[in-house]
Image (spheres, coloured by chain):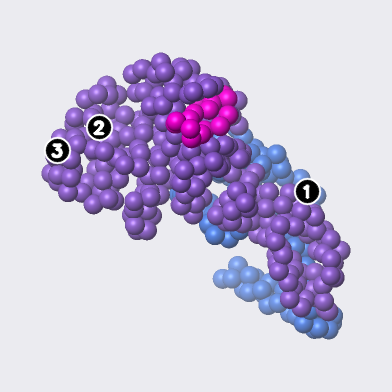
Amino acid sequence: MNDTNPIVQIHGLSKWFGGTDALRDVNLDIHSGSIIGLLGANGAGKSTLLRHIIGLYLPNKGTCVTFGCEAGKLGPAQLGRIGYVHQEGELLEWMKVGQLIRYVSTYYPNWNHQLEEKYVADYEISMEARVGSLSPGQRQRLAILLAIGFEPELLILDEPASTLDPVARGQFLDLLLQIIQNENRTIIISSHILSDVEKIIDHVVIMEAGRILRDCSFDELKEEFHCVRLSTLSGDLPVNLPFENVIQQQRSNGQAVITVRNTTPEQIEQTAEDLNCQVEIQTLPLEEIYKIIVS
Amino acid sequence: MLLEIDHHGGVPIYRQVIEQVRRQIMAGQLGEGQQLNSVRELAGRLRVNPMTISKAYALLEIEGLVERRRGVGLFVARVRESHKEQTKARLLEQILKKAAMMAVQFEIPEEEAARMLVDLYRKHDARTRSHSNE
């Protein structure tokens, strides 16, 4: 579905800090209109990679090109198309919320005041409150408003929900689901809370120790693994089940639960048919898939 | 179009959409020529990524169940009767297969299982008829 030029092109990118390798020969294209989940443990290199995209870091080797412009040469023309929300989220603590919104909005000629009003009303943002007195959830919402108020084409969310409690995380996901209804917007969301991002992403990039382990469509990844429950109609299952690429297996009496890789539901059904077994086939939660891939 | 998505069901969302739309077309709940919700509308309502709906719609189009009218949207296509019958039989077989296997597993005699199916069929068929007569 993506036949356009990528909006971000990362080629052979390596980055080190002193003797520590942060990114090793990373290659990645980001296409317009996709919602990318950037997954990895803390320290895998997610934030470092994202900072290259907006030119906060420059590559030691290789290139990172955003909206056709190299990381080191990014200017207002490109940065004005990117919204960025990061972990620490420094805001001007002494301002009132309303003042901060006005202050930031003046930098953007295309600031969408209607969107701002709707957002402020929907999320009950108090314009009179001091920024420094906000709860983590309120802060997060404010940071997101500041990042989407100018309707950026690319929205980068670096661990946006990590400081939020489960209720606030739920609200945040709802908000993201609204934002992604605009099909031309590209979102990169990095997270280690996988159940959060699973509902909204359509593309997955998995990082580990500065490298990209997987870069593929989310459906493709989901359908690579299946959990298969078998139950015989009578008697026991054969000792060796004729499935290929078995990752995990548990069994008792006439039942077995196995995890298989690269086997289609049709193939699984056929095998179950040959075994004369009842079969239930499910995909795995992203969290399980992630564990298999990084192990 | 009434669709329900199970986010924890272990079936990819685009597949859930395809299965439900296909079934509604076979059941006549979505009639020939009827317009499908737009990608945006449906994605917004189901709270899913619009790409997921686009993908489901594209696959339904390939299957020939829906057709795109340029600049207007997607509509339920005219489907050949033979194709419809095949699809209906395939969907029914999937369900019956589960029932048959359970009957074998529970050692319910063949005649009894068959009789249960016939009884259930008659019960529901009668019910539908009495409704439509009202």
Q: Amino acid at mark 1?
A: His
The rendered magenta stretch, by its main secondary structure, is classed as strand
Residue, disc 3 = A95
User: Regarding mark 1 in the picture, which secondary structure is present there?
Assistant: helix
Q: Chain of mark 2?
A: A
Query: What is the count of numbered marks?
Result: 3
Q: Quadrant of residue A120?
A: top left
Kindly check if marks 3 and 1 are in contact, taking CB atoms under 8 A apart as contact.
Answer: no
Segment tinted magenta in the rendering? A6-25
Which structural element holds mark 2?
A: helix
Q: Residue at x 27, y 50 (%)?
A: A136
Question: Residue, x 73% and y 72% (percent of image)?
Answer: A251
Which mark's residue is nearer the viewer, 2 or 1? 2
What mark, if any, has residue A113 been given in the picture?
Answer: 2
Disc 1 designates what residue? B83
Q: Kindly identify the amino acid type of the residue bearing the numbered disc 2.
A: His
Which residue is drawn at the image coordinates 44% and 21% (left, top)? A71
Q: Amino acid at mark 3?
A: Met
The residues tagged by marks 3 and 1 sit, at their Cα atoms, a distance apart of 66 Å
Residue A76 screen position, x and y as percent: 33, 18
Q: Quadrant of the C terminus of chain B?
A: bottom right
